[in-house]
Image (cartoon, rainbow, N blue to C red):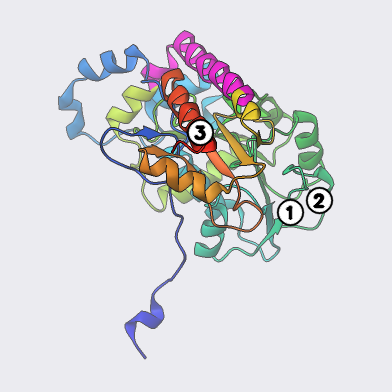
């Protein structure tokens, strides 16, 4: 008997590479634009003497601003250190039964990590041949459901009507809709939290609000669900949201014009790049996110991935069944995407 016999061993989530230096980084779905100038101003003006005090356990001004912007009651809002933290607490809170929870087989690869870590039984549901969710697959006995919309890494969007079908037909399960990319072309199911008390909607500041480095995530749901999540969170660590993060997040929410402007830039660039990739022989599910999940008709994704990396261009590739010939390409600035497209042209023509 060794002490190692009592250690909890899991296979951890593996994030995309974080290269240093001057590179074109299209592998982690970060927003290519900086946060609103209001964020910079708020941090410059922040009274650092406040940092000697503990932060508000509920998120203070940040939660208040979220409630105002999203037109919900503040007791219907949960904040955490990025949506990963929010989802982790949600898994720990709501999935405590013996029936398996359900989520897609090709999806955000943290879901099965949390399930394994928290000893939650789970079953993955295969996407169809078009990499899309079939709603009927989720009308079965389960201990909970998690659906990202748009899905990652495919970028495919499910309609609100289809999601409501799943939610309404699973009244005894908590249904989590992970909307990390919803602002890039989708319609949120957030209004449905007043209609279904089993719905939890999770979003993040990391993508559309240009603040992946600050770590802000939020969940919206019935007050009872949010209370349960806070009870679990406060049993682990009450003070997860620091004061500078609260100030920065609240300032970002006060600049909706900038938020909409940057989203539009990303969307416009994405739509242009879709056309250029098609011309170069790539296929992909139609994306409603800030990335494109593409495969080439004749060239191997792994070879493109490795060749791009040698040119200091980073995209994402997984050595996994069904998707090992696909690249997930984050949308950067127009200049970054031009450089990437130029690289692809050279590679396809044999010049690289």
Decide: is 333 above or below 163.
above
Check disc 2 and report the residue beneath it: 137
Residue lying at the far left of the rendered structure: 49
Q: Which percent across, then down, holds residue 277?
A: 60, 29
User: Which quadrant would residue 292 be assigned to in this image?
Assistant: top right
Q: CA distance from mark 1 to mark 2?
A: 9 Å
- Tag 1 and tag 3, C-beta contact below 8 Å: no
Check disc 1 and report the residue beneath it: 126
User: Which quadrant would residue 253 be assigned to in this image?
Assistant: top left
Residue 270 in sight in this render: yes
Q: Which percent across, then down, holds residue 322?
A: 66, 54
Residue at the (43%, 40%) spot, across then down: 308
Please, what secondary structure does the residue beneath circle 3 have? helix
Q: Which percent across, then down, holds residue 282?
A: 64, 35
Check disc 3 and report the residue beneath it: 344
Residue at the (63%, 41%) spot, across then down: 296
Residues shaded magenta: 250-275
Count how many numbered circles sit on residues in the image: 3
| Mark 3 closeness class: few <14, some 14–19, many ≥20 residues within 10 Å | some
Q: CA distance from mark 2 to mark 3?
A: 38 Å
Quadrant of image for the N terminus: bottom left
- Tag 1 and tag 2, C-beta contact below 8 Å: yes
Q: Which secondary structure is most common in the magenta stretch?
A: helix
User: Is 76 left or right of 189, judged from the image as shown?
Assistant: left
Please, what secondary structure does the residue beneath circle 1 have? loop
Front position in the image: 330 or 51: 330
Q: CA distance from mark 1 to mark 3?
A: 31 Å
């Amino acid at each position: 008997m060794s002490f190692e016999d009592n250690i909890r061993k899991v296979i951890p989530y593996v994030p995309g590479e974080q290269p240093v230096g001057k590179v074109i980084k299209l592998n982690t779905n970060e927003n290519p634009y900086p946060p609103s100038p209001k964020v910079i101003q708020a941090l410059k003006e922040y009274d650092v003497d406040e940092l000697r005090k503990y932060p508000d356990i509920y998120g203070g001004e940040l939660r208040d601003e979220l409630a105002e912007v999203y037109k919900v009651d503040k007791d219907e809002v949960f904040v955490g250190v990025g949506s990963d933290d929010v989802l982790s607490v949600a898994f720990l809170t709501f999935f405590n039964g013996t029936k398996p929870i359900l989520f897609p087989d090709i999806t955000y690869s943290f879901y099965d990590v949390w399930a394994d870590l928290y000893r939650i039984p789970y079953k993955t549901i295969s996407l169809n041949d078009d990499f899309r969710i079939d709603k009927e697959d989720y009308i079965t006995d389960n201990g909970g459901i998690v659906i990202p919309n748009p899905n990652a890494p495919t970028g495919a969007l499910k309609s609100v009507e289809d999601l409501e079908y799943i939610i309404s037909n699973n009244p005894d399960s908590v249904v989590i809709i992970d909307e990390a990319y919803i602002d890039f072309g989708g319609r949120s199911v957030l209004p449905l939290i007043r209609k279904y008390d089993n719905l939890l909607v999770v979003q993040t500041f990391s993508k559309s609000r240009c603040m992946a480095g600050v770590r802000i995530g939020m969940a919206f749901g019935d007050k009872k669900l949010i209370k349960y999540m806070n009870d679990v969170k406060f049993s682990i660590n009450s003070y997860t949201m620091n004061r500078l993060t609260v100030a920065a997040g609240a300032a970002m929410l006060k600049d909706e014009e900038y938020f909409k402007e940057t989203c539009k830039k990303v969307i416009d660039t994405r739509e242009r790049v879709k056309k250029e990739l098609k011309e170069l022989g790539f296929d992909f599910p139609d994306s409603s996110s800030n990335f494109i999940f593409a495969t080439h008709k004749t060239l191997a994704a792994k070879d493109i991935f490795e060749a791009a990396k040698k040119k200091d261009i980073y995209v994402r590739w997984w050595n996994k069944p069904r998707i090992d010939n696909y690249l997930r390409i984050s949308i950067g600035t127009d200049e970054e995407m031009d450089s990437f497209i130029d690289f692809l042209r050279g590679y396809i023509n044999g010049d690289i």
